[in-house]
Amino acid sequence: MVEPTGFKPAIADRRLTPVTPAAPVRAAEGPTQVAQTSSAAALTQTAAASAPVDAERVARIKKAIADGKFPLVPSTVADRLLALKLQWNPHDKA
């Protein structure tokens, strides 16, 4: 026979033992937190100190463009723009 759905009174099972609630965990304090903060700050300062761009190379390219000696190939520029848009590596074989 199929039991109907709905409210059923809870029956205490003697095989189950009650579980005591665990105490809440406090956030770590002291040297661990300070060490993480100082290492993150040191990493940020190191990254900010050195620019991710080679300024000398940028200056050389700007000068070559101004002098008309920088080789700009429109098809290469278009291919690279499409590759960026489609997240495709232009050096991969088709």
Image: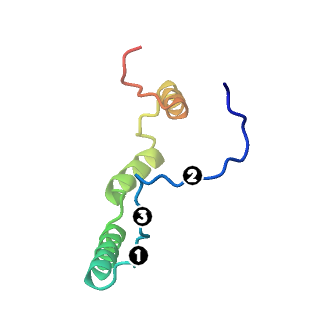
Sequence-first tag of 2 and 3: 2
Q: Quadrant of residue 43?
A: bottom left
At horizontal 42% and vertical 34% (from top left) the residue drawn is: 71
Which label sits in the foreground, 2 or 1? 2
At horizontal 37% and vertical 21% (from top left) the residue drawn is: 92
At horizontal 65% and vertical 51% (from top left) the residue drawn is: 9
**Quadrant location of the N terminus in the rendered image:** top right
Crowdedness near tag 3: few (<14), some (14–19) or many (≥20) residues, C-alpha within 10 Å: few
**Quadrant location of the C terminus in the rendered image:** top left
- Residue annotated with mark 1: 23
Image side of residue 4 versus residue 61, left or right: right
Image side of residue 83 versus residue 92, left or right: right
Sequence-first tag of 2 and 1: 2
Image side of residue 43 versus residue 84, left or right: left
Image side of residue 8 versus residue 28, left or right: right
Could you tell me the amino acid type at mark 3? Answer: Val
Secondary structure beneath label 1: loop
**Residue 34 image position (x, y, % from top left):** 31, 82
Could you tell me the amino acid type at mark 2? Answer: Ile
Q: Nearer the viewer, residue 17 or 79?
A: 17
Crowdedness near tag 2: few (<14), some (14–19) or many (≥20) residues, C-alpha within 10 Å: few
In the image, residue 26 sits, relative to residue 48, either above or below, namely below
Secondary structure beneath label 2: loop
**Residue 38 image position (x, y, % from top left):** 30, 79
Which label sits in the foreground, 2 or 3? 2
Crowdedness near tag 1: few (<14), some (14–19) or many (≥20) residues, C-alpha within 10 Å: few
- Residue annotated with mark 2: 11
Q: How is the image coloured?
A: rainbow
Could you tell me the amino acid type at mark 1? Answer: Ala
**Residue 85 image position (x, y, % from top left):** 55, 33
Picture mark count: 3
- Residue annotated with mark 3: 19
